[in-house]
Image: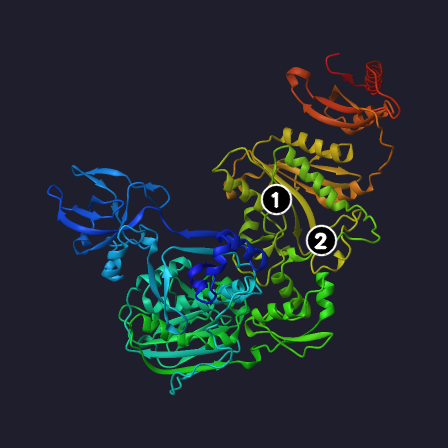
Amino acid sequence: MKTSLSWISMYTPLESILKEKSITELAHLYSIHTAEIDDILTHDLDKIVIGKVLSCEKHPDSKKLSIVRVFLGEKLGEETILTGAENIVNAKYVPVATVGAVLGEDFVIGERKMAGMISRGMICGDNEIGLVSEVAAGIMILEEIWDEKFLETMVGKSVFDLSIDFPGIGGKIVQIPLRDTTFEIDNKFITNRPDLFSVIGNAREWATIFDENFTNPLPLEATPTQLSNKMLDVAIESDKCLAYTLLETDNLTAEKSPLAIRVMMERAGLNPKLDLVDITNMILTEYGQPMHAFDADKIVGKISVRMAKNGEKIEALNDETYELTDKDLVIADESGPIAIAGVIGGKNSAVSETTTRVFWESATFDATSVRLTAQRHSIRTDASTRYEKSLDPTLALKPFPRVLEYLEFLGKNPEIKGQFSGINTDAVHDINILVPFALVEQKSGIKIPQETIFHILQKLGFTISNITEESFSVHVPSWRATKDINIPEDIVEEILRIYGYDNIPAIALSGDFSIQAKNFEISLTNRILNFFSARGWNEVYNYSFTNLGLEKKILSENRDQLIAIQNTYTEDFTHMRTSLAPRLFINIAENLRHQENLKFFEIGKIYAKNLERDSKIEKMLAGQENLPFPERTKLGGVTTSETIASLRNVLDEFFVELFGFIPAVSQGASLAPFLHPGVCGEYSHDGVLLAKFGKIHPQVVENFGIPDTAIYFEIDFEAIFQLEKNTEKHLKPISVYQPITRELNFLLPKHTEIGSVAHKIEAAHPWISRVVVDDIFEDAEKIGKNMRSVNFSFVVQSPDSTISDEDAKNIQESIIQAIAEAGYKLRGM
């Protein structure tokens, strides 16, 4: 979420800290102790000053332009600026971008000739100086917001020296400077901390980290504020509604929010709408509590919170119509759904410019229910994001006094007509945890003073009691009790993250250590990654999911073997994948716009109900027989820059490098439905299928929109894992003498197993090691039909002496002789 430093400072004073530390240092410390700050946005522009309008007259040669004479202070003096803004005739004080100012990303203000006159500068609208994003109808007239006498004293100074009135704690007006900083906090994946989705929650963290005061505007009691004696009639018909409150106000008007509200919303990443709606979004950001405003005059009869009926429809605020199921929780009146609970409101009850009577809703809904509904209908909103983190139900009881403060700030005079409050007390968790001091010391490795422990926890809102020599009790505040703090270790983590892990001294580990056995699976994976990466292939990570549409695209014939996902949240991910191919084909299609020569590979699991496993292959991981469905690891690859022959060379090299030989290769007719039946093949060894490869079926090529030159291969990771694991390894002493590298190029028939030739080279002399195939070349015109030129490099190293040139020559001749005896000759001889 985004929150501004000024908003945070309303609840915890950071002025003294900013005198000692920079904004960057503050962000770094927050990232270490609480959550990472992704970005820092500064709201300040150079050379944007307050100008006083001295004169304004229409341009004699232009109907649209006005000639404005402005005074920019003693230092800058007077300037003539031409503007097309019609409201300039009413302005006395305006923001002026002087020559050299930069607006937006790269719009530099300079001296310009317009309609025969020189204009030096630009009179700006509030959007042009970055206060809001909505395009202004004209220029910003400063005296509409600030007192003229005050503005007279500010002429020539930066516009960002100004401050705006804003309703602070208890409705007290505070000054928010236009010069501000916004922090973008990466909290979207911190699913256990719904309190971090609020300004107040983040302010509490800042206050704790820097040991400053924190003012909490929210009452700690889990009881609603009584604002009316009239109880509204609301029916709660589902236990998925954990808390529900409703406030009815009359005598209102809906209009555009003043600058202060719009500025604060923009800095929080929100889009201003009408002021009554903006209030709900301000409280969403400030308290972390989603709210909704209904036009009460559009509500038909009684409001109820219930499960939808299958087939019910609602037109939502995003102008989309959704067909609901009996698994969706809704807010409804007697005519039907008026909101999808916790997700989005309905258009039929939306606030508009004609609204005078409002139902203000503040509620808490079951996190799982909201998440599944949002996923089912592919809707993501700020409200659903917060609800699915498991909000504190008592928080729903607390926003209405703040609503009235905002209404007062906006100059409204609301008439309270009634309210409703209800909470499921079983959903409010009362958690007390006994924490041994010894546990804190054991987990931290140091003895932290008790007063430090208690101070940290109390700053975070925890209550300490039952202190003994051995332990103490901690009461967890409601905003941390939904699914966050449950066990003593959670309390220790809170202590240590604020105390600072960098304050724990580094101590060298001591004791007996055993060397762990080599993990063959990881070793093989790394070797595969290195092999393909070194040859220009790019590794990709795809989701392990598929759908019926994708299966049809790859011409899958066994869709009954698909494993359906019960809690799918998008139509793209309805089943577990049975092949790596479809997502790799999508990778090719999506990247063709950038380049034509593509090479992608992926190591991943596939799943099916009756996935066959070769009886000769052991299970890689203990316990796989207990999995709810079979899985198997594959290495898949797809390329548009190789031919079948060149891919064969790559795969030959792959097997030679890993195992020292090339497995038997044969043509295949039906290896996979998505492969071309006439142009595919397989590698096998000892009766075990190791790999398959081939061109892609023409229909699949058309289905995915990929080139017909694309080639696919798939290697059975588990089969080659077992093969690599069973390959005998021999150890020998490491020589201290300098090795030398030599190369020899032999002409071999295509059917020759290159691995056997490599073994003969290595066996030709005991000093030979590390025989590697560097290159395989085929050209019928140059070297003959059905022949290939294979370049071998090998290392020669003596165990007890330095190798001389004569030694190297003799070894090379012994290799040539050994290969000649096998029926092969050196190229060029």
Residue lying farthest left?
60
> Could you tell me which secondary element the residue under label 2 belongs to?
loop
| Residue 28 drawn above or below residue 231 | above
Residue lying farthest bottom?
229
Residue lying farthest right?
800
Which residue occupies 66% across, 22% down? 778
Q: Is residue 668 visible?
A: no
How did the renderer colour the structure?
rainbow
Q: Measuring from the top left, give residue 745's x and y in whole percent.
A: 73, 19
**In which quadrant will I find the C terminus?**
top right
Q: Measuring from the top left, give residue 626's x and y in whole percent.
A: 75, 60
Q: Which tag is nearer the camera, tag 1 or tag 2? A: 2
Question: Looking at numbered disc 2 in the image, what kind of residue is underneath it?
Answer: Ala
Residue carrying label 1? 673
Question: Looking at numbered disc 1 in the image, what kind of residue is underneath it?
Answer: Pro
Q: Is residue 331 left or right of residue 36?
A: left
Residue carrying label 2? 506
Which residue occupies 13% across, 47% down? 58
Q: Is residue 570 left or right of residue 97?
A: right
Quarter of the image where one finds residue 293 = bottom left
Q: Is residue 732 visible?
A: yes
